[in-house]
Amino acid sequence: MKQRLPGVYTAKRKDGTTYFRASLTYRNKHISLGSYDQEQLAHETYLCALCLLKDSSLHLDDYTASSPLSFVKWVSLINFRDNGIYFNTPIYIKPRFFYYYFSPSDFFIFDRDDLFYYSSRKISRRGGHYFVADYGMQINIMSRYGIKNYAVENKDYRFINGNPNDLRYENIEILNRYHGVCAIQKKGRTIYQVKIHVKGNVTVGTYATETEAAIAYNKAIDLLKKAGVDKAYTPNYMEGISPAVYADLYSSVKVSSRLYDYRSE
């Protein structure tokens, strides 16, 4: 590729037409800035990036839509300038956490333990949900923090400081870990109510422990399947419990008689 204006290189598309690539090398790191149809725009992008790297008075909230740089590049370059690490994703590192930016006023806060994960995965948004591509699948990022797709804020989980964009582990409290289980307060103690949906909610029972409640939900699934209910229920996966203990609890846990007598139409 033949260099033209500083920071600009020409390249050819498959159809033979020419386009212009902007790039720079800073602290021995080669950084691609983007591709453009006009040489002048590629050059302006290079100049903007160079200025951003050299001028520490420029910050994330100085970004404007008129900038030739994309906002993702703006964040990546400022982080590289201030922290010496370059990421392709819009991450800015702080001593104990980092920001993942969508715009100067729209961002997530993550623990440093998650830095490797999000430095190599782009977060996409769709209908208020956030996903990353992981092994060819779209994974809802909330599942990383024990928040299931059906979970309801302040019922199944809550953000301790009230900020739903703060996804640091210390800020997330899981209230209900299992399908069909809801923790409720009664006379100063926590009990666990279980419901399952079959043409409306059916109360399975109320239990002293979360484990018993989760197993009761699984037992309800099995009874409904035996009754011919063709519905894709998701059973609760139990961690830290042996098969023998699970079997004993499954056998002893009581569920509503309606489930034993249920007949599918």
Image (cartoon, rainbow, N blue to C red):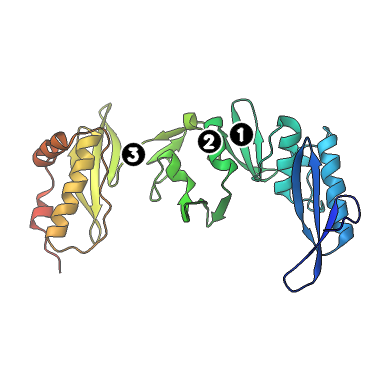
Q: Position of residue 99 (x, y in %)?
A: 62, 37
Q: Position of residue 193 (x, y in %)?
A: 24, 41
* Type of amino acid under label 2: Asp
| Quadrant of the image occupied by residue 31 | top right
| Quadrant of the image occupied by residue 208 | top left
**Does the residue at mark 1 contact the one at mark 2 (Cβ under 8 Å)?**
yes
- Residue tagged by mark 1? 98
Point out the frontmost of discs 2 and 3.
Answer: 2
- Secondary element type, mark 3: loop
Q: Position of residue 110 (x, y in %)?
A: 55, 35
- Is residue 160 in view from this perspective? no
Marks 2/3: CA–CA distance: 23 Å
**Does the residue at mark 3 contact the one at mark 1 (Cβ under 8 Å)?**
no
Residue at 68% of width from left, 34% of height from top? Answer: 85
| Quadrant of the image occupied by residue 239 | top left
* Type of amino acid under label 3: Asn
Q: Horizontal placement of 169 versus 60: left or right?
A: left
Marks 3/1: CA–CA distance: 28 Å
The quadrant of the rendering that contains the C terminus is bottom left
* Type of amino acid under label 1: Phe
Return the mark for residue 202. Answer: none
Q: Position of residue 92 (x, y in %)?
A: 67, 36
- Residue tagged by mark 2? 114
